Amino acid sequence: MMNRRSFLAAAAAAFAPATLLRAAEGKRRVVVVGAGLAGLSCAYELRKLGFEAIVLEGQGCAGGRVQTLREDLDWGLSAETGATRIPDTHHMTLDYVREFGLTLEPFKGGDLADVLHLRGQNYVSGHGPEPDWPLQLTPEERHLGRGGMAKRYMAGPLELAKGSEDSLSVPGPILEQDHYTLRQFLEKQGLSRDAIELVTLGGDKAASAGLLLLVELNEQVTREYFHIRGGNDQLPGALAKQLELGGAIRYGCRVTSVGQDDSGAWAVMEHAGGHETVRGDYVVSALPFSVARNLFADARLSAEKQRAEAVLEGEGAERVCEYRSGVGEILGAWAGVAGGARPPAVVCHWRERGKARHDGCA
Ligand SMILES: Cc1cc2nc3c(=O)[nH]c(=O)nc-3n(C[C@H](O)[C@H](O)[C@H](O)COP(=O)(O)OP(=O)(O)OC[C@H]3O[C@@H](n4cnc5c(N)ncnc54)[C@H](O)[C@@H]3O)c2cc1C
């Protein structure tokens, strides 16, 4: 039977365009937009295949949504403001961790509460009794609470998909929900408007319900989570270092549009020196869809890609977890989830489990 690892490898091979792989023979040039983990790993792998890859990054450093804070923390402590835990199902990430000689430690989530910012107030959820939500919920919705509603109303397709986790294709019961946004999916289940607001707080109601269910299925089959000792930013740091050695990353280059014609593709960017166009045989977007959708008006995207760009958004939640290097246990954290207000209200952290430092919280 195919396991999840071979499934992912087979899926990657199935989606790799044959023309792209063949093109390596002639040392073709690929412009990669974005130096987050996606862009860095893409450029790194392309270079292994013999391509010339150039990465254009809008900010002054690599890593994107993988960010570790160290300043202003006690010695030996670091705090993840982005990607926090690496599931054992993320084989490619774990392979890179090994390749670059980084050390994993178990991620112990601990008994953490969510802090939800709802209609101007902060609520702590997931610990003790359910907060008195300022929402018009039905008696059943109020009884189930936020977690109970999510469990009950997302459960149907997940139950039906059970047993097909190792399948090569997306399980049918989940794929069926790809036609609906999360909001539509929850409406179909009969949830009230306010209950949908509560269940999806900090998330993206307009994203594909199928995609979110797939993420949830992955969570369910994950047995263990890890963290990189000393901070997760070491992984994009190691990839970036490899690429920087060959001068393959250009920082401070914000791409404003991407185009394509019969002879290749190009990215137009702004940097300290003005505007510049970088041409290649291909341009790869490693940007969040919410950004990418504004840049590709002149590119010949397939209908499927156009649809994906139209429906997918970036992430809206923020989280800070604090680590002591070598101990590998979260000392305390609040997962901050904001609704309504933008930018999302975030987050404070505390040094000892259960001792909240409320000052400074939005
Ligand atoms: C708070 C938080 C917690 C998370 N927790 C986890 C977790 O525990 N486990 C997990 O697996 N995942 C987690 N994630 C998700 C994970 O961080 C992301 O999926 C991953 O980092 C995305 O990588 P990416 O390369 O696709 O995008 P990004 O990291 O967003 O990279 C995109 C890059 O493109 C650059 N860019 C943007 N616009 C332009 C432009 N116009 N021109 C040039 N460059 C541009 C950005 O500066 C950025 O460097 C979390 C995310 C967040 C925000």
Image (cartoon, rainbow, N blue to C red):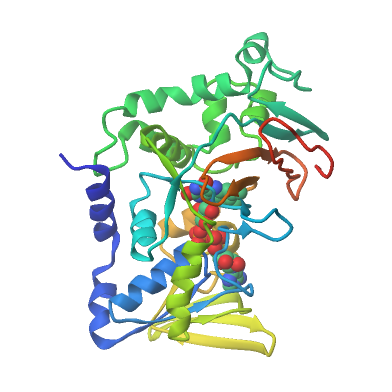
Count up the numbered dots.
Answer: 0
Q: Position of residue 93 (x, y in %)?
A: 39, 56
Give the quadrant of the C terminus.
Answer: top right
The answer to whether 193 appears left or right of 8 in the picture is right
Quarter of the figure with residue 26: bottom left
Q: Residue at x 61, y 55 (%)?
A: 76
Give the quadrant of the N terminus.
Answer: top left
Q: Position of residue 196 (x, y in %)?
A: 63, 28
Q: Residue at x 65, y 22 (%)?
A: 127
Taking the view exactly as shown, the residue that stands out farthest to the bottom is 273
Q: Is residue 219 above or below residue 96?
A: above
For residue 289, say whether it is visible. Answer: yes
For residue 205, say whether it is visible. Answer: no
Pick the residue in front: 48 or 128. Answer: 128
Pick the residue in front: 318 or 165. Answer: 318
Q: Where is residue 194 in the image (x, y as percent from the top left)?
A: 70, 25
The answer to whether 215 appears left or right of 331 in the picture is left
Q: Which residue is drawn at 41% across and 63% down?
A: 302
Taking the view exactly as shown, the residue that stands out farthest to the left is 1
Q: Residue at x 71, y 43 (%)?
A: 349
Q: Position of residue 290 (x, y in %)?
A: 59, 57
Q: In this view, does 151 lie above or below 310?
A: above
Q: In which quarter of the image is ligand 1?
A: bottom right
